[in-house]
Image (spheres, rainbow, N blue to C red):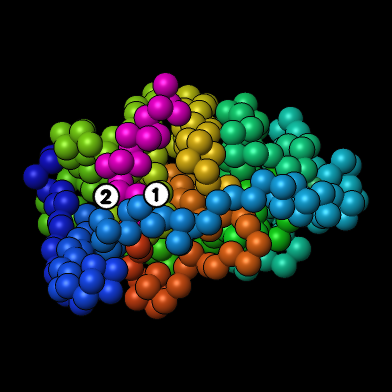
Amino acid sequence: MTDTIRFERHRQLSQLHNPMMGGQLDTQQIELRRDPLTGRPSAFNPRLQDKVAMFHGASDEALIERLAEAGRERCFLCEDRWMRMTPTYPDVVIPSGRVQVGSCVLFPNLFPVAQVHAVVRVGDAHHLRLDAFDPSLLHDAFSAALQFVRALARAEPSARHLTLSANYLHPAGASIAHPHFQVVGGDLPLGTVAEMAAACRQHRDAHGSDFWPDLVDAEREAAERVIDDVGPVTWIAAFSPRGANEVLGVLPARRHLLQLDDTDVTALCKGVSCVLKGYRAMGVSTFNFTLFSGPMGAGDDPMRCVMRIISRQNVYENYRTDDYFLQKQLGTELILTPPEQLAAMLRRSFE
Ligand SMILES: [Zn+2]
């Protein structure tokens, strides 16, 4: 049902005497958008579009290499060091202590921030460029995470609210360069998971249909933000993003992680790989992603499995954070690349 989704835009005018225009009165137009699910706003001033470099400086590739090299010697994920230096799960959860799929290995975080907090080593390479995250490597990492989720469903069924996330490089929150993902969750949904669950519930109560399948239909009808369909996953540039260059991968037929089969995982990994390639082509060097899910085992939950990928500040010396008071205190993202343009750019990396 496409009439249940509202792509809300609100226009504001802001006036100033502009010294760059000889002191003339300058009227600038700002567009506030609202996320059709949560109502979260984002702000766009078209005049900032050619000033993206003011906010995101160019990635310093030499610095990225230098920092990665500096951490290589003491990296606990490199070579076979993970075998000695990473913790293991009790036998009752994972009989061999860790989950290994190819070169990817899942083990517990030494200092968990939640009931469930696992780390996935993503491959042997200490440093990968964004265009080097091959679908097959991602498939091994995602498969390790999902094997763990299935093991938890048996050993620790109270941990129903699980997510798979990633920080990549230090501006995105990563403490080491070596690619790694994290499974986080427990018996209570964390902030965004709870916010999305409540909004999905409200949508069903109001319309008798579920938000995510409705969104996919509405975005298909609008056409301008759909990037591609890869098997069961529809990739969309988010209408009102909560991070820079936000891309959503929606699986309208999957309510939680236990429902994902190999076709789903293959499609997800291909899409993630294409988005990261596209980011690289745009000059981006960092990212966060989260694969959201409804509660494990829920038969008729209104949530769906949704991958959200955002880019973060680029790596360069003395970079300034991309998350300032606007995002952190006012819960509003600044749009620099309009989602409709982002979709057009990323379509090329999906070809
Ligand atoms: Zn390493």
The residue tagged 2 is: 239
> Which corner quadrant of the image does residue 80 belong to?
top right
On screen, residue 60 versus residue 188, left or right, reads right
Q: Where is residue 306 in the image (x, y as percent from the top left)?
A: 40, 45
Q: Residue furthest front?
A: 22
Which residue is found at the position 59% from the left and 50% from the top?
59
Q: Measuring 20% from the left and 33% from the top, which residue is drawn there?
A: 223
Residue range in magenta is: 336-351
- Residue 349 visible in the picture: yes
Q: Is mark 1 on a helix, strand or loop?
A: strand
Residue at 67% x, 46% y: name it: 61
Based on the picture, tell me whether residue 162 belongs to the magenta stretch. no
Instruction: Residue under label 1, please give it.
Output: 246
Disc 2 crowd rating (10 Å Cα; few below 14, some 14-19, many 20+) is many
Q: How far apart are marks 1 and 2 (CA)?
A: 9 Å
**Kind of residue at disc 2:** Phe
Residue 127 vs 54, above or below: the answer is: above
In the displayed structure, does residue 70 sit left or right of residue 345? right
Q: Is mark 2 on a helix, strand or loop?
A: loop
Say how many tags the image has.
Answer: 2
Q: Which of 77 and 105 is in front in this view?
A: 77
Check disc 1 and give the amino acid type.
Glu
**Is the N terminus in the top left, top right, bottom left or bottom right quadrant?**
top left
